[in-house]
Amino acid sequence: MKAAVASPHNPMSTLSRLYARPGFLLRRAHQISAGVFEDECKDLSLTPAQFGVLTVLQAHPGLGQSSLARALGFDKVTVLRVLRGLQARGLVTRCPAETNRRNMVVALTPAGEDVLAQAQKPAEKAYKRLMAPLDREQQEQLLQLLQLLTGELEDDARAAFVPPGVPAPRQAA
């Protein structure tokens, strides 16, 4: 049996190439990761993005909304959408910063602290479930490769990733 030849006239070959592309596989892996996380955290009605926000806010209470977005590599619209959902559930508060009333600072509420504490075990279970198909060496290799890929191509991201406490890069004028 002959292998499929890559050509625009061979739809199966075109699909095979699409399905083998890193971007396709990374997007699919992200969908699976989110699905596994949401399944494990369904009793808490928590998404990976919400978990990330709560985790960052626990480590850095009173973080500005823009800094929070950068700490997770979110764009401003995404962080605002996630924050509005968390605020509606009473898990975070948002209020104007004292130094600049246009900037919003965000903090966990006691209910947010409680949900985050309850989420630790299911989040860890989700992580283990996601990594289960790989042996320990493959898990370490996957994480190293993803860190290398994201680190080397950070400048190509749609949204900046700047961990809290690290100065944001200056924008070109």
Image (cartoon, rainbow, N blue to C red):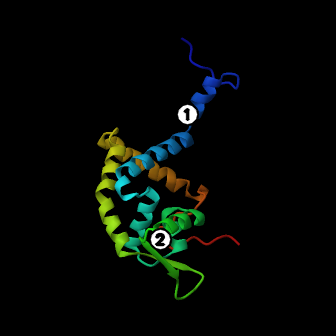
State the residue position of label 2: 87
Q: Nearer the viewer, residue 94 or 9?
A: 94
Q: Is residue 55 above or below residue 23?
A: below
Image coordinates for residue 38, horizontal then vertical, percent: 41, 51
Identify residue type, mark 1. Tyr
Residue 162 left/right relative to 108: right
**Whether label 1 touches label 2, CB < 8 Å:** no
Q: Which mark is residue 19?
A: 1
* Residue positioned 41% across, 67% down in the render: 54
Q: How many marks?
A: 2
Whichever of callouts 1 and 2 sits on the residue coming sooner in the sequence is: 1
How far apart in space, not on screen, are marks 1 and 2 (Cα)?
39 Å
Name above or below for residue 164 compared with residue 131. Answer: below
Residue 158 location, x and y as percent?
61, 58
Secondary structure under badge 2?
helix
Q: Where, quadrant-wise, is the C terminus in this rendering?
A: bottom right
Q: Position of residue 156 (x, y in %)?
A: 61, 55
What kind of element bears circle 1? helix
Report the amino acid beneath label 2.
Gln
Q: Which of the pair 13/90 is nearer the observer?
A: 90
Q: Nearer the viewer, mark 1 or mark 2?
A: 2
Residue 137 locus on image (x, y percent): 32, 42
Q: Nearer the viewer, residue 127 or 148?
A: 127
> Residue visible at 50% across and 42% down?
28
Residue 74: image tag: none
The residue lying toward the viewer, choosing from 98 and 4, is 98
Residue occupying the point 50% across, 56% down: 151
Near mark 1 (Cα within 10 A), the count class, few <14, some 14-19 or many ≥20, is: few
